[in-house]
Image (cartoon, rainbow, N blue to C red):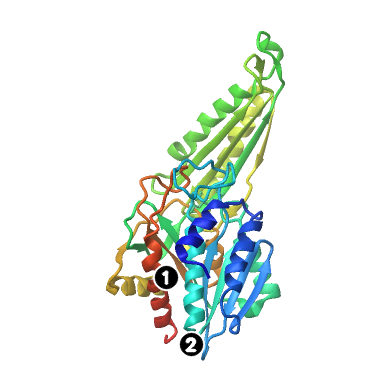
Amino acid sequence: MKTLLDIRRDLHRIPELGFKEVKTQAYLLEQIHSLPQDRLTIVTWKTGIVVKVEGLQPTQTIGWRTDIDGLPITEATDVAFSSEHLGRMHACGHDMHMTVALGLLQKIVESPLNDHMVFLFQPAEESPGGALPMLHWLKEEQPELMPDKIFAYHVAPEYSVGTIATRPGLLFANTSELYMDLVGKEGHAAYPHQAKDMSIAAATLLLQLQSIVSRVVNPMKPAVLTIGKFSSGTVQNIISGHARLEGTIRTMDASTMTLIKEKIEVFCHATEIAFDCDVKIDYGSSYYQVYNNEDIANDFLAFAEQHEATNAIHCEAAMTGEDFGYFLKDIPGMLFWAGVDSPFGLHHAKMNPSEKVLDYLVPFVDKYFRTLTSK
Ligand SMILES: CC(=O)N[C@@H](CCC[C@H](N)C(=O)O)C(=O)O
């Protein structure tokens, strides 16, 4: 297998969107096949991969999951190994996640655990969500690859290298994507009375939506409603007959998510009446909250506190989403943040994680898994 630094940089060059990770899958398979194969079972699922390493005296199967997809972002770092795929970038650190998974796999192949270990290389975390269908496939078709405990990490630009942060219980939010198409009537810019202007309708709706979190949701219940994309019209002197708003909803509980959706529907219906148009809502994909098993997270934090290379932090929950939440709904386990010290945050075109994290994270997690095997 190549060095972890080379692997990270190679993967960084070839980001691909969810369920289109064809080059990524081929690259990962090449690395996995370069390892000694005698203890390995390798199975592919869509653009994902599952690798099982036979344990020496197994009593359980420990799982490690990495996401493998990139984002629709044009990279603006000046690193020599920038994305070769225009408009695509590993801006959420999944290149780092995959590299750590390969590093751990190599370590465990070289020195197997007593327990079985399963590595899940999961497609489409950003969208539309690969965890839930992958989990169904595992349960239905590959039950012998199902882990009894499961772990994952996420890079954290805001923490310094060496920081490990997590918490027992709720770590990440429930999410729902949100797409709204507004259809009115296109017309000449000089004849507004003969058109149904969807730029004005969408702008009004966007501002109204912002009152849901501030005026409908109980302020003691955290929630976010972000519209990240507004598109409307074709040219400067034609009134737009079609607008589209694209966003995401984040809540810490299911009832707040339901309340927000109900209110969105009221505002969309009001827009239809006020602007004499049609508004179609599509909630896209939704992710279940990331809820860490309390005993496992406490045990992991205690281990990290004692480890010489790490600074353990019991952190706050965040409004980020992760479809890893679906794994944690079924399998006890946890997700943690690992600091990568980048001035630009997740989903930023200049996000540039420190590669130093690769030096300590693999031996750290490997060491932790060797404590689990005796529990
Ligand atoms: C860790 C992270 O940044 N995850 C994404 C997950 C996106 C879920 C979905 N596509 C949505 O936008 O609702 C995040 O944006 O938090």
In the rendered structure, find residue 169 and report the number of the disc placed on it. Answer: none
287 or 273: which is nearer to us?
A: 287
Residue at coordinates 30% horizontally, 69% vertically from top-left? 309
Quadrant position of the C terminus in the picture: bottom left
Point out the residue furthest to the bottom here: 57
Q: Tag 2: residue type?
A: Asn
Image coordinates for residue 304, horizontal then vertical, percent: 32, 71
The answer to the question of whether label 1 and label 2 lie on touching residues, with beta carbons closer than 8 A, is no
Question: Count of labels shown?
Answer: 2
Q: Quadrant of residue 48?
A: bottom right
Tell me: residue 192, above or below residue 268: above
In the rendered view, would you say 6 is above or below 110? above
Secondary structure beneath disc 1? helix
Identify the residue at horizontal 66%, vertical 54% (top origin).
Answer: 20
Q: Which residue is mark 1?
A: 362
Q: Position of residue 300 (x, y in %)?
A: 37, 72
Q: Residue 31 at what x, y percent from top left?
A: 57, 68
- Give the residue drawn at x 46%, y 65%: 4
Secondary element under disc 2, as helix, strand or loop, is: loop
Place of residue 172 in the rendered image (x, y in percent of width and height, measured from the top left): 45, 57
Judge from the rendering whether residue 151 lies leftward or rightward of residue 18; answer left or right. Answer: left
| Residue 136 appears left or right of 344 | right
Along the viewing direction, whichever of 204 and 72 lies nearer the viewer: 72
Query: Does residue 94 appear anywhere in the picture?
Result: no
Q: Amino acid at mark 1?
A: Val
- Against 203, residue 341 (above or below) is below
Queried on whether the Cβ of the residue with tag 2 lies below 8 angstroms from ligand 1, the answer reads no
Give the distance between the C-alpha atoms of the residues marked 1 and 2, in whole angstroms: 18 Å
**Residue matched to label 2:** 114
In this view, the residue in front, 207 or 112, is 112
Quadrant of residue 73 in the image? top right
